[in-house]
Amino acid sequence: MLKNISLNNVSSLGIYYPGNSILHRLQARTKLLVILFILVAYYIADQRVWHFIPYIVMGLLTLGAVWMSGVSFRHMWQRMWLLILLAVIGAVPTAFIPDNPADHPVLTMGPLPVAYGLLRNTLLIYGAAFLIYFVVFLLPTEKIRRMRHRRWFKVVRFFLVLLAIVDLVLLFLIRRMPDSGTFPVGPIIATQLSVWYVMDFFVIFLVLYALALLLTMTTTPVALIEGLTMLLSPLRRLRLPVDDFALMTLIALRFIPTLIEEGEQLIKAQTARGASIARGSLRDRFQSITAMFTPFLQGALRRAADLATALDARGYEVEKRRTPLHETSLHLLDYTVLGIVVLLMVVSLVV
């Protein structure tokens, strides 16, 4: 799990990567305003059903941003593939939940009568196949031992175990049902609005996640907070704690890689003492993870206390106004990017 977000494997979570691309040269305010414009455009486009042009433009803008950032599409795919998989798994069943019963159906499946005897035999066959699979992969051969440590095998094993649990639950529920009896499956109905809302949310969710990744990868945390503070500065007139919010956000972004490094050190320390979260039974792994919680929390609190002491020693005061170090006046490139984004989104909404 931590291998995918570790510092040594190029994590994008709250980590800035130096560069000289177009996105790197943009002011943080420009990037934040672009994301804000896309959010506003999404809210307006959501009011028109089956209006795909704004979402196509959002997708093209995201692809263009990845290209201008200097980040490879393969690197973005490595950061997003799991999220895309989970989104698809969640979107497919959601499309068959009618948002409005009076809406026009797009697809109707069922009702399909299923005999209890057929279902029971199918569940028993799967249970027997899973038992054979479990026994085979317990054999102490070198080939099977190497296969057990492969990443894809662990994912497949998780889903197979989950299906086995569902199999046992279903067998328990239908244990007293007669073999000749039947029960209906369905009807499963997908309406126009349910399909549209799923597609709508799926696209904007992935677009915003990709833009958030690009924002943190091409903007230093200090510049990002400076831009956010300058955009929220009018709220000071309402006596809102803009500077407090900016400081908390900066510390949170800065501590993400620090906490990841802390977790890596704890894992290495436990591995050196013979405890590993990647091997052993489920109970052993759970005990190893639980044993990490207390030292991890102590380390986070210790770092927070050291940071508070350092701020007090340097006389830091939140109420004081500070001169921005990274954020300057907007340049021609910033105005050009803002103008192109606004123009494209307005045209896509009007067409």
Image (cartoon, rainbow, N blue to C red):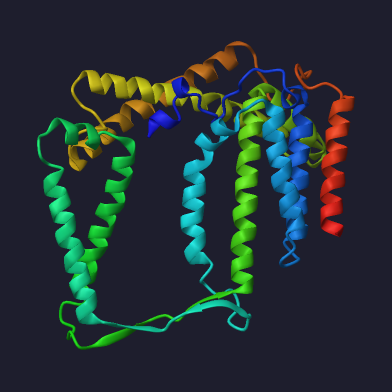
Q: Residue at x 33, y 44 (%)?
A: 155
Eyeballing the image, is 257 above or below 133? above
Q: Quadrant of residue 114?
A: bottom left
**Considering depth in this image, is 134 or 39 the residue closer to the camera?**
134
The N terminus sits in image quarter: top left
Number of marks in picture: 0
**116 to the left or right of 327:** left
Q: Is residue 226 above or below residue 207?
A: above
Residue 258: % across, % down: 48, 22
**Residue at the location (78% across, 38% down)?**
33
Q: Position of residue 40 (x, y in %)?
A: 77, 51
Where residue 334 appears, x then y in whole percent? 84, 29
Residue nearest the observer in this picture, 4 or 275: 4
State left or right for residue 351 relative to residue 197: right
In the rendered image, the quadrant that contains the C terminus is: bottom right
* Residue drawn at x 50%, y 55% as measured from the top left: 88
Give the vertical position of 284 relative to 200 (above or below): above
Whether residue 162 is visible to the viewer of this picture, yes or no, is yes
Which residue, as the protein is rendered here, is positioned at the far front? Answer: 143
Residue at 42 percent across and 80 percent down: it is: 186
Looking at the image, can residue 239 be seen? Answer: no
